[in-house]
Image: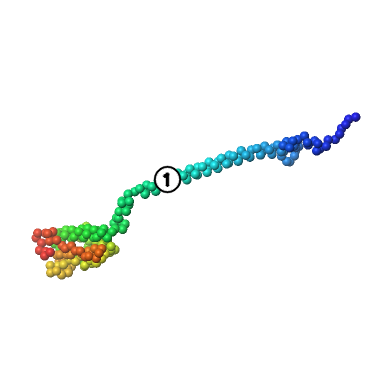
Amino acid sequence: MLNNKAKNPIDDMSQYSSGQALPTSPDSSQPSIAYSQMGKSRSPKKFIIVAAVLLLILAAGVVWALASGNKNNTSSNSTGNQNPAASNTPTSQKDPTAAGRDSERVTDIKSIDTLLELFYQNNTYYPALADLNDPTWISNSMPGLQKELTRDPSGSGYDFAETSVKGQYGYRPLNSSGQDCDNGDTNACVTFTLTYTLENGTQKSVKSNPTSAPADSTSTR
């Protein structure tokens, strides 16, 4: 007599160890445990690759930051090692000292004086005050008188006053009688006085020079 005893399903499952996949039917809609474990075995590899890429990016960023810091330090040291005397030397374009402005005044007045004497040698009279304050007259009759020469270093205008005040040069031409002149028919300007004011308020002057007049001149300078 055959002993065809029905197998207990629980006893039948005992042959599989805890880590062993259970068989599934081919038409099952759920993936087998074996396939699931294959997918899991690939995940750590992907994670390692992504982590390695991130570490490379981070390392490149650190290297770049260090290189930039060293470059900035080198530039700062180079600037700090410059000659302090050269960097602190005042220039007229920046903020000239009082002595620098006074020196510029002296230079301006000497240049104007020279131009006036040259004009006299060619014309036997000096310009009237109105002439030196007329840009058109200067352009036509005395082009060597540059505009900046007529401006005091502390001033903003280019016109001459009869007598200098702080920030403005003075020019006073006179006729042979020592009176104001306008270069009319009988009122020629034959002498002049240039004046300028120093930073401390002292007024200085330069007068027309008789030695520069033509030999045949009747000037009373």
x, y (%) of residue 216? Answer: 9, 60
Residue 27 image-quadrant placement: top right
Q: Residue at x 80, y 35 (%)?
A: 12
Colour pattern: rainbow
Question: How dense is the environment of label 1, judged by Cα within 10 Å: few (below 14), some, or many (20 and up)?
Answer: few
Residue 28 position in % (x across, y down): 75, 39
* Badge count: 1
Q: Is residue 18 above or below residue 108?
A: above
Residue type for callout 1: Lys
Q: Is residue 170 visible?
A: no
Q: Position of residue 110 (x, y in %)?
A: 20, 59
Q: Residue at x 88, y 31 (%)?
A: 3
Q: Is 46 left or right of 19, judged from the image as shown?
A: left
Question: Farthest residue toward the right?
Answer: 1
Check disc 1 and report the residue beneath it. 71
Residue 201 located left or right of residue 35: left
Q: Quadrant of residue 50?
A: top right
Q: Quadrant of residue 203?
A: bottom left
Q: Considering the numbered disc 1 on the image, is that residue within a helix, a strand or a loop?
A: helix
Closer to us: 127 or 30: 30
x 15%, y 62%: residue: 208
List x then y, in percent, for residue 169. 23, 64
Where is 37 relative to 213, above or below?
Answer: above
Name the quadrant of the C terminus.
bottom left
| Identity of the residue furthest to the top in this view | 1
Q: Nearer the viewer, residue 1 or 194?
A: 1
Identify which residue is drawn at 22% across, 65% down. 202
Residue 85 visible? The answer is yes
Q: Name the quarter where the N terminus is drawn.
A: top right
